[in-house]
Image (cartoon, coloured by chain):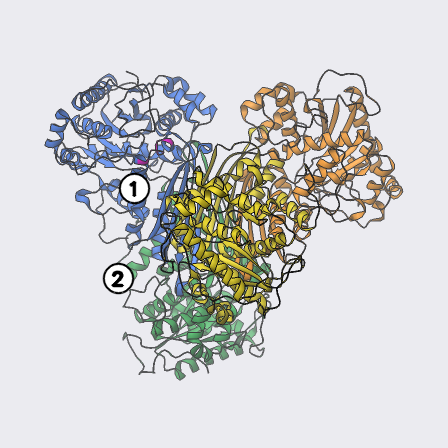
Chain colours: A blue, B green, C yellow, D orange
Amino acid sequence: MNTLTGRRPSRRKSGDEPVDRLGVAVVGLGGAVATTAVAGVELLRLGACGQDGLPLAARTDLVPYEGLVFGGWDVSADDLAKAAHFHQVLDPAQIEAVAPRLQRVRPWPAVADPAYCRGVGGANVTPSGGLREQTDRIREDLRHFRAEQELDEVVVVNLASTERQPDLASPSLASPEAFEAALDGGSEAITPAMLYAYAALREDMAYVNFTPSVGADVPALTQLAERRDVPIAGKDGKTGQTMVKTVLAPALRSRALRVEGWYSTNLLGNRDGRALEDPGSLASKTATKESVLDAVLGYPVEDHLVRIDYYRPRGDRKEAWDNIDLVGFLGRRMQMKIDFLCQDSALAAPLVLELVRLLAEARRRGERGVQEQFGFFFKAPMTVDGRVPEHALHRQERALLDWLDGRAPRDGQS
Amino acid sequence: MNTLTGRRPSRRKSGDEPVDRLGVAVVGLGGAVATTAVAGVELLRLGACGQDGLPLAARTDLVPYEGLVFGGWDVSADDLAKAAHFHQVLDPAQIEAVAPRLQRVRPWPAVADPAYCRGVGGANVTPSGGLREQTDRIREDLRHFRAEQELDEVVVVNLASTERQPDLASPSLASPEAFEAALDGGSEAITPAMLYAYAALREDMAYVNFTPSVGADVPALTQLAERRDVPIAGKDGKTGQTMVKTVLAPALRSRALRVEGWYSTNLLGNRDGRALEDPGSLASKTATKESVLDAVLGYPVEDHLVRIDYYRPRGDRKEAWDNIDLVGFLGRRMQMKIDFLCQDSALAAPLVLELVRLLAEARRRGERGVQEQFGFFFKAPMTVDGRVPEHALHRQERALLDWLDGRAPRDGQS
Amino acid sequence: MNTLTGRRPSRRKSGDEPVDRLGVAVVGLGGAVATTAVAGVELLRLGACGQDGLPLAARTDLVPYEGLVFGGWDVSADDLAKAAHFHQVLDPAQIEAVAPRLQRVRPWPAVADPAYCRGVGGANVTPSGGLREQTDRIREDLRHFRAEQELDEVVVVNLASTERQPDLASPSLASPEAFEAALDGGSEAITPAMLYAYAALREDMAYVNFTPSVGADVPALTQLAERRDVPIAGKDGKTGQTMVKTVLAPALRSRALRVEGWYSTNLLGNRDGRALEDPGSLASKTATKESVLDAVLGYPVEDHLVRIDYYRPRGDRKEAWDNIDLVGFLGRRMQMKIDFLCQDSALAAPLVLELVRLLAEARRRGERGVQEQFGFFFKAPMTVDGRVPEHALHRQERALLDWLDGRAPRDGQS
Amino acid sequence: MNTLTGRRPSRRKSGDEPVDRLGVAVVGLGGAVATTAVAGVELLRLGACGQDGLPLAARTDLVPYEGLVFGGWDVSADDLAKAAHFHQVLDPAQIEAVAPRLQRVRPWPAVADPAYCRGVGGANVTPSGGLREQTDRIREDLRHFRAEQELDEVVVVNLASTERQPDLASPSLASPEAFEAALDGGSEAITPAMLYAYAALREDMAYVNFTPSVGADVPALTQLAERRDVPIAGKDGKTGQTMVKTVLAPALRSRALRVEGWYSTNLLGNRDGRALEDPGSLASKTATKESVLDAVLGYPVEDHLVRIDYYRPRGDRKEAWDNIDLVGFLGRRMQMKIDFLCQDSALAAPLVLELVRLLAEARRRGERGVQEQFGFFFKAPMTVDGRVPEHALHRQERALLDWLDGRAPRDGQS
């Protein structure tokens, strides 16, 4: 088994002792975001980069970045040095500096189901088998990872390409018991992402879903997390356009500027963009993007359009162009246009690192079930009992910092 | 004396009784912002427009918009219907609907000093005279306004074109006593804007400065406000580009995206834009625009450029184009461009209406001196004892709402 | 029959005498483009507007704008004053100035087929009947128009909403004989737009198609035009984004800047935009938009995407946003973004006026069949024998001016 | 003397024999444009890059790129490999590929005059001396270059940072005789750029000015070029924003869209940008940029503003943002915004290579004096007898290709 070793192994910790070696098991380890996260930790270890992009770099109460040990699954068997060259997120000099360490990390064979993610394929997959057999293999991978690497804790992270939406009304997803039965008997409603989430929970490992896919956000798995005292969080990392939207929209509301229309288009050319050429995956993605606006503004925006296009020339660098039509005092019409030339993986990777550290902290504190206070990181924050989530970035940040500082949230604060 | 009557006069109020008729004495009454504010109140009275753009429309604890009675000074003697036609902020149909009422409002002769504002001139000026004589005339105007209109309170608002910066180190501005002496003896450091602010304070009327000019923000006048128990606020309304800046910059900081450069350019074609063709006035304006960024981010942005250009084709509709250069994780460079096609007066006028109502409320509550909690409205919020002001819009809003609700601000909250 | 009368009727002209009264029979007379064109001619007649937007305003050898007399069909029976109010292209004051004349123009009942244009409907339609019956009615309308208005010539213009693409391989469209047989026997391949084109040709009237629909551009009708000595031109007016594309792309080729990708998105909110919510109509529209680029550049652009979205807040004002990815010397990558905030009808209407004048001139000169020299006005210029059309705007302009001046085109000129 | 050798020396050519080895003597050899041009020729020689960005790559009748041999002057003595690293125009891998050859090229000491170019300095300057002495040194450099490298021809190219404008009315610049006298007697009107131009002409070498500085565009030097039968061309390379302007403006005229205002701003962060922080140099630059628009449109644009700002974060990559206010049919107002994210040197260097080849061709053909047909490359094309130059890019291209093909220009063609 190949992993990236943080430091020399030390003894296991128990109780609320600080975590020395935190395992990160990534679904989609060879993707651009994961590769960037792993390379970033190596560059931080070398002192070869600063802490730009890491919102919690100053929090010394969290596991240090250097304590992270990476492993995970991918449909491509390429080692991470090769993956980094392919994704072209880092400078050649940066890849070279950490190549010896990245070469040692090779993804484990992944569970794949073309019915749920058509756009992206690969040969590094487990032999087909029943759902139960697949979860058993994933759990075996996780136990092996923890033992071999002498890890204090493991967090499982979903960074795989977007799956299409399953049938959420399926009885198989309604309770842990039904889910267990379906694992044995088979069910079309169970997606690969759910298998990884289930395996994590059964191994008492925290789970975080950074993708728009349905992962632990079904009753069967949120209840399982509650019962097993395991924290979970998600979903769909809020990196570019939606992040800006949840910053601007609250301000427009503060100034009482009415949003008459909001047109958002996205150009992206990396593997995730290609996966979105499948209409099923695209629907999952735009759904989480569209839910945000009305909630923040407090009224429905009739003309809120979100477009995502695979546009090859841009590679991992993406572009989000937004047009907002506003109505101000006395009906005066105004427009705002925002063009964000960003780099998907550079925005996402540091958030993944922070989430992993936060879930380890939540585990240490004995939190269980959905961790709403991590909504700061997500386009579609999971909530307890289906509450409407808070989307405004500054209020999400406030909630996160309050939790970190052990301070009760202040009601009615905006 | 010409004014715009809110409702039929009622008896004067005393103590903390609610205000029925609130006078608004505007410096620069014929300008685009003031004209739009006056017309807006008339349209609200007719029920001919909605409440878009008015952030505090739902606060029934403030004086209703219909209670506002306008008067004021301008270098142009045109009545406000004529001014509204000239500024082209409103639709012709809107102007027509309120023209009979606007025609009744004619600006009083203004104090003007070409040494301080070269770009804009007019014939409706008081005969030249000493500084004392000029403040006497302004005070007489204010007393006459209050009496004739049977006003419960009067708030003085500066909406005049930007003046160039005076010599702030002048001893004449250092204390109320020195200022009084200079009014009699003459001083080049005393600007027209200060004369109006002084007159307001001496008449025990609240004062708010919505322009970048130096108004009450000198020790002589802030101390005078304290001594006379009068609330003051300012300065420089935060409407377009800077509003967006104080929304985005906190979010960039939240995400640890480092701002390497921020280039802001402004095209505006109205009377205020023409005034800024004078380098002195322009310097005052860009100064308040530039101070914001470093304070919000917590580090100096070496390449923060702010350009303002008078560009005739745009009229009162203005355009603010911003480019931001960002550095993210592992040194990845990104860019964000924002193009805000807005209408200056439609953004500013409703904020002026809210400030007037808030200052009346502050006066009712017995507040005195600089009202920091109104920083939400300003590019360069005045603070007590020269403290660095809060610029982040969402924290300014929090402080405002806390004050309105009689709640103590929560320390350390971000 | 209601029409807009140019001047007092004069005697009919013959031979190559100049045309005094030129009839314009518009398919889609109540739409934004047609209404704007008609109102524009009336405003020109009043001297109430300048000649901005009219490329051939200086050509005194063409029929003067004041000589145009409008009539036509529409699925809405509203008179053109009402239509002008609805479309909001003109200022209220402009509509008022010409309302008495516009009120006199009421569209004739139109031939409509929901199978070909689902997005837009109306009650002002002819009773259903066979294809032959429908062409007979259209021809009767045209004869009546010519006689009643004492017109020297009539040009038929298609400005109706975009139809979906018919089966172009249908034998019914292959020759005039087959078409005639199909009119009697019925054929699913014959669209409403073709019926109007056929009727025009049978009445010896020039025909121009300003829409992306298939009109006269099938062998049956181009051959008919040749046989009857009638000039035809089309198709799809080149107004906004594509106009800019055929200006920039030749320059990029001149500078050898390689186009790696070109992403075009369009927001439009008028009736034409709504028609494009039907996927069939949308396909017709994007097809003509996409064909342009490769032809101009001389190589295929793999990543040329064109998106069109109906976006209600914009009304007739539309927005075209383009991103171009360029590769320059030594592989240096560059980007150009263009945001065109334009008004569809204001761009299209004057081109329609010029085309009508040019087709009258072509008729006067005895030209017949496809008029390639009018490609300047079209996104998908019709050519003789399926030749690849010239798309570069400056070369199209050269060809047009050469024809107007009776000068032979210079071979090899670029 | 250090130069970059094209191929093995061959015998000298005479008459109109093709040129084998063409010397290129560059003023400002260490700058970003020159370094990129030299590196580009080396990469072409290695077959390590394509021909993107080279408009005349297909013209086999011109000297091949591989025949170019570079030398020149710079205030910095750094070899070109070091300069290439500094400018960061090329990828590290590209620099590495040609570093051995670039290291052999070291700039000769330059003539510098801080009075004319304050922004940029360096130590690699000739000892101060009289003007005559300086021209003698330059001529000696040129003769040495030609002899040592066994060059068939030499073209002198000005690529140095922009100088401020001299007193063009000075009698010293009025005739060759006056200029000669001034070289001996001294004159403040003679700039370093003129000294290089004069030296080239006296050595019978063609001269091209790619900068906004005054070079050969004074009567003294254009007459000298005529007398000595030497071709000259200039000035100010048309690369980014102005190139786009001379493409779009002709199209707007073709469509009769009236330009009410055009606002252009430029962000650039390379050495040339720094030089423009000197107001004198900036004035030279904006003058050539501003002259273009009215000439193309045929009427004066009252509100044409051009801003250039040194903005460090962008380095050699620059950004040009344009806003155009248009008036169309019936007074409808529209806007177009263009954001060009380009790379100065990558746009300029290939044009320099083409100009050098063209001037060698002009010399071979015996052309003398100002070569108007090269206006395609310049923002402010020099003309004979002060004629207004053609600015529209497509007409400039036509004129260039006509000349290349030995075809007379067609009068009246637009």
The structure residue drawn at horizontal position 35% and vertical position 74%, both measured from the top left corner, is: B46
The x and y percentages for residue B291 are: 47, 52
Q: Estimate how packed mark 2 is, as few (under 14), some (14 to 19) or many (20 or more) residues with alpha carbons within 10 Å.
A: few
Within the image, what quadrant is residue D162 found in?
Answer: top right
Q: Is residue B243 above or below residue A236?
A: below
Q: Estimate how packed mark 1 is, as few (under 14), some (14 to 19) or many (20 or more) residues with alpha carbons within 10 Å.
A: some
The structure residue drawn at horizontal position 29% and vertical position 38%, both measured from the top left corner, is: A284
**Residue A288 tag number:** 1
Q: Is residue B260 visible?
A: no
| Count of numbered badges drawn on the protein | 2
The x and y percentages for residue C206 are: 56, 53
Q: Secondary structure at mark 2?
A: loop
**Residue B405 tag number:** 2
* A145 with respect to B200 (left or right): left
Within the image, what quadrant is residue D113 found in?
Answer: top right
Q: Are marks 1 and 2 on the same chain?
A: no
**Residue A397 tag number:** none
Amino acid at the residue labelled 1: Thr
* D15 with respect to C40 (left or right): right
* C70 with respect to B377 (left or right): right
Amino acid at the residue labelled 2: Asp
